[in-house]
Amino acid sequence: MKRRALVSVSNKEGIIPFVSGLVDAGFEVVSTGGTKKAIQEAGIAVTGIQEVTGFPEILEGRVKTLHPNIHGGLLAMREKQEHQEQLQEHHITPIDVVVVNLYPFQQTIAKEDSTFEDAIENIDIGGPSMLRAAAKNHKHVTVVVDPADYDTVLTELKDGVTTETRRRLAAKVYRHTAAYDAVIAEYLTEAVGEESPETYTVTYEKKQSLRYGENPHQKATFYKKPLAKDGSIATATQLHGKELSYNNINDANAALAIVKEFTEPAAVAIKHMNPCGVGTGQTIEEAYDKAYEADPVSIFGGIIALNQEVDQTAALKMKEIFLEIIIAPAFTEEALSVLKEKKNLRLLTVDTSKAKSTEATLTSIHGGLLVQDEDTHSFDEAEISVPTKREPTEDEWKALKLAWKVVKHVKSNAIVLANDQMTVGVGAGQMNRVGAAAIALEQAGDRMEGAVMGSDAFFPMGDTVEAAAKAGVRAIIQPGGSIRDQESIDMADRYDIAMVFTGVRHFKH
């Protein structure tokens, strides 16, 4: 008895050689629409779907495969006599191989001119139904959703596709249809403005396997969102150097988050997810100089992110020390020539000017997931107030803004000391705010001239303000909101410090 294969694909990559192989293996090929046309044009015998269903395609193709003659052939269990009798009674031929991939929903919504109506019309109904039916009955049906599996299936067909292969292909089908539905669900959820749906469904596509995770004994993989936004590490282009590691990717993501805060030339040095130096200037070279000067010890082995093209002069300076990664929108040919002399140095391009959109922040916990909005709250959005007797000077305002941009990205408890061009001290991840301030002040050393302090959360008492004042800090920016704010205000007034309240804290864990 001739075996039957059902073929209906949007992605026609490799389909003609595969169908040819099916025919050579003794299969009758059944197909629909554009796939059938492509097979016919290749000179291969093919049966139209309506010859099997006895019913024409209707509703502009919306209904063509949703028919008992198709799904009966997919779901019938060969070892059950009752199923076989029903197939014979209704003149249904079993289907042994299903090759289906789906309408290009994701590609459709990625287009700038795509409309809601376009999206809806590219939601596949019959395709997922056939795939899921075939995958459920994979004991008897070989189901293929990925062109990468064509060769394996053709090779095994000669002796019968193994149970292991059919089970692996079925699992891939359910991952594929789940991911397809997840993209649709996300699109429609955003379209109706649902902020906290009863279920949260997301999907990611494998970008690369990693050598290991945070530590060598941990396995890891890098996945990206199907429609990952430009300006992210997930869409970066690597021009040179070793393969990225798990820690590289995490640190690079942190570096990009900070450098996106700036419109003027800026450079950010990251070490272990925290900024060790942030600098700005008239040129990218000057910005790098400031970031290096901020902490010339910690920058060693770190990651640099810049928001403007790297030229030869800046490249020569960056070449002088050991860096893991340099990220920039572009590199001149001369800069690339200089930096590529270091064979392991990873060079990535990311256009940070396209990174204005936001997305949810996901934090995995054992047995669950925390979802929150991305922290994009800026200085310009803050409800600024000055509760002290003295207001900041013009230069102090510039420094306060820089400190506030950076402290948002430092692990809590966080203190940042900065002047109007660079950070001079960073205290990160401490159990109390006084400890974070002590670290930042010690790091700043004799560079306190013109330095201000930024704090990610309010001061619960006046001790941090007093420590800052004694070290030479002349202005402080913090959220305010403590029941003991007045203690900090009084301490600031005592030392003639200007204090700015923003009304918004920036915890980061």
Image (spheres, rainbow, N blue to C red):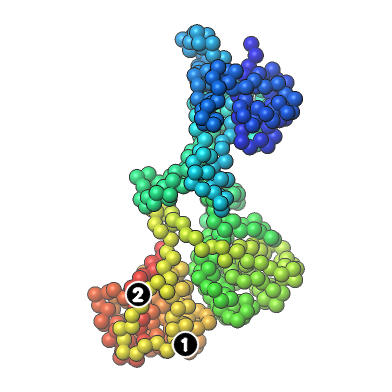
Asked which secondary structure carries label 1, the reply is helix
User: Outermost residue, left direction?
Assistant: 483
Q: Nearer the viewer, residue 54 or 417?
A: 54
Please name which of the two marks, 2 or 1, marks the residue nearer to the observer: 2
Q: Is residue 6 in view?
A: yes
Residue at x 54% of width, y 62% of height? 355
In this rendering, is residue 382 above or below 389? above
Question: Which of the pair 455/501 is nearer the observer?
Answer: 501
- Identify the residue at horizontal 53%, vertical 37% (top origin): 176
What amino acid type is highlighted by mark number 1? Asp
Label 2: state its secondary structure: loop
Q: Quadrant of the C terminus?
A: bottom left
Q: Tell me: 413 left or right of 177.
A: left
Q: Nearer the viewer, residue 434 or 503?
A: 503
Of callouts 2 and 1, the N-terminal one: 2
> Is 10 drawn above or below residue 27 in the view shown?
below
Crowding at dot 1, Cα within 10 Å, few <14 / some 14-19 / many 20+, comes out as few
- Judge whether 97 appears above or below 311 on screen: above
Which residue corresponds to mark 2?
383
Q: How many marks?
A: 2
On the rendered structure, is 168 left or right of 372? right
The residue to which callout 1 is attached is 395
